[in-house]
Image (cartoon, rainbow, N blue to C red):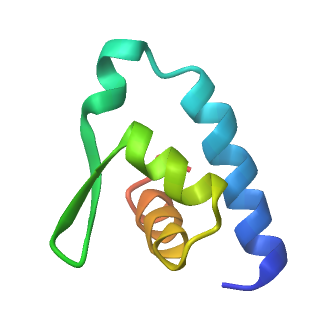
Amino acid sequence: MNKEGYEILKAKFIKLFANVPFPLREEIIAVVDNQPFSWTAAYGEIKQDTDKSQIILTHLKQIGLL
């Protein structure tokens, strides 16, 4: 994924995250290297631009959330 594509998916995720009800934010939305990520954990990874954030965003795009 190139930098521009990453930034577009990141912006879409942040916009989507803002509309996720608080009780649902602890639901698991992705698994990376056998580690589950909730909406909240994924948000933290994506805001910090970690290596796993690209994998999470790609997964969410593949399943149609982004």
Residue at the limit of the structure toward the left, as seen here: 34
* Image position of 6 with respect to 20: above or below: below
Residue name at image x 65 percent, y 53 percent: 47
Q: Nearer the viewer, residue 5 or 39?
A: 39
Number of labels in the image equals 0
- The answer to which image quadrant residue 32 occupies is bottom left
Q: Is residue 49 above or below residue 10?
A: below
Q: Residue at x 75, y 48 (%)?
A: 11
Relative image position of residue 45 (x, y in whole percent): 51, 58
Q: Residue 13 location, x and y as percent?
A: 61, 45
> Which picture quadrant has residue 35?
bottom left
Q: Is residue 6 left or right of residue 43?
A: right
- Residue drawn at x 31%, y 14% as measured from the top left: 23
Q: Nearer the viewer, residue 4 or 35?
A: 35
Q: Is residue 53 left or right of residue 29?
A: right
Hey, which residue is sitting farthest right in the picture?
A: 4
